[in-house]
């Protein structure tokens, strides 16, 4: 349905220009139009409606329902994410699609989990989610970083729960439970590794300052100088 155009002259002649014209107030195929069309047309239009997810249908309906009739502007406008109202003629279809997607986006549960866990810091999620794309071309490293953000790394802690490994303890030090935070940051072997990395960077006149657990989990998203270099090294080090 997305790829194929639904333009059919006979439907347009009957007055169905937008998908919203086909949906009734209770979110189904509009019965008002049943009498106007033949069974073949009805079947075609119903297949369009049924291919639209229910949430999208509600959005489409909400956007076509006008409870308070206002004057119709001579040039239709659209409200951008920034709050600006822009004439629709100045907006590309791609931007409209983006606005539509923003309305139906649901935050991943891992994001909420990490927000609660690191509630003492302000996380710039846009930067955090784009960081791996900006700072490395290696698909395996990118994947690894997204697994961290999605909280789906198979550490010994998780593997032990499902009976794959005998001990939940850290592969390196054997002293503590191998969680992502332990493995990537607090393990004495890992922290020693980071110490060496930072000292090597300092010798090369790249100053990272201190790094803490969120810096390792998310990347150093709040720096300007050497952003790509430092984050590339952090990603590489984690992997
Ligand atoms: Zn350890």
Image: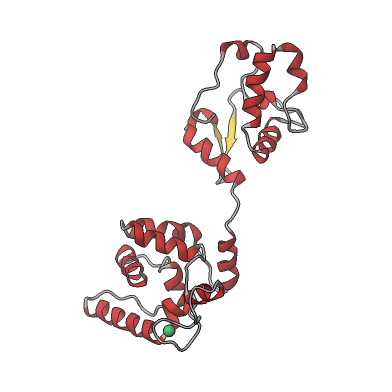
| Residue 8 horizontal side relative to residue 126, left or right | right
Residue furthest out toward the bottom: 175
Split into 4 quadrants, where in the image is the C terminus? bottom left
Where residue 14 appears, as percent x and y from the top left, is 66, 12
Asked whether the viewer can see residue 187, the reply is yes
Whether residue 104 sits left or right of residue 166 in the image: it is right
Left or right relative to 62: residue 157: left
Residue 176 percent across, percent down from the top left:
49, 86
Q: Quadrant of residue 71?
A: top right
Camera-side residue: 134 or 85? 134
Kindly identify the residue that appears in the image at 60 percent across and 51 percent down: 106
Q: Residue at x 21, y 76 (%)?
A: 204
The x and y percentages for residue 147 are 46, 63
Q: Is residue 199 above or below residue 72?
A: below
Q: Nearer the viewer, residue 84 or 195?
A: 195
Ligand 1 quarter of the rendering: bottom left
In-front residue for pair 232/123: 232
Could you tell me which residue is drawn at 50 percent across and 60 percent down?
125
Residue drawn at the location 38% of the way across and 59% of the way down: 142
């Amino acid at each position: 349905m997305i790829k194929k155009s639904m333009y059919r002259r006979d439907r347009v002649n009957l007055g169905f220009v937008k998908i919203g014209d086909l949906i009734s107030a209770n979110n189904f195929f509009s019965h008002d139009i049943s009498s106007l069309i033949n069974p073949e047309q009805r079947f075609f239009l119903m297949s369009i409606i049924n291919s639209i997810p229910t949430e999208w249908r509600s959005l489409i309906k909400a956007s076509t329902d006008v409870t308070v009739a206002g004057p119709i502007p001579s040039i239709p406008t659209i409200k951008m994410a920034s709050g600006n109202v822009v004439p629709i003629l100045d907006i590309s279809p791609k931007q409209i699609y983006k606005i539509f997607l923003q309305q139906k986006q649901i935050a991943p549960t891992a994001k909420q989990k990490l927000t609660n866990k690191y509630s003492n810091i302000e996380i710039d999620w846009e930067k955090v989610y784009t960081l791996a794309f900006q700072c490395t071309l290696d698909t395996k490293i990118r994947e690894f970083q997204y697994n961290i953000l999605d909280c789906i790394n198979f550490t010994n802690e998780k593997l032990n729960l499902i009976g794959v490994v005998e001990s939940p303890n850290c592969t390196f030090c054997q002293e503590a439970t191998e969680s992502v935070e332990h493995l990537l940051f607090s393990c004495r072997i890992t922290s020693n590794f980071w110490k060496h990395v930072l000292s090597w960077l300092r010798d090369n006149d790249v100053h990272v300052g201190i790094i803490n657990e969120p810096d390792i989990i998310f990347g150093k998203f709040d720096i300007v100088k050497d952003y790509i270099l430092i984050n590339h090294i952090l990603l590489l080090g984690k992997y």
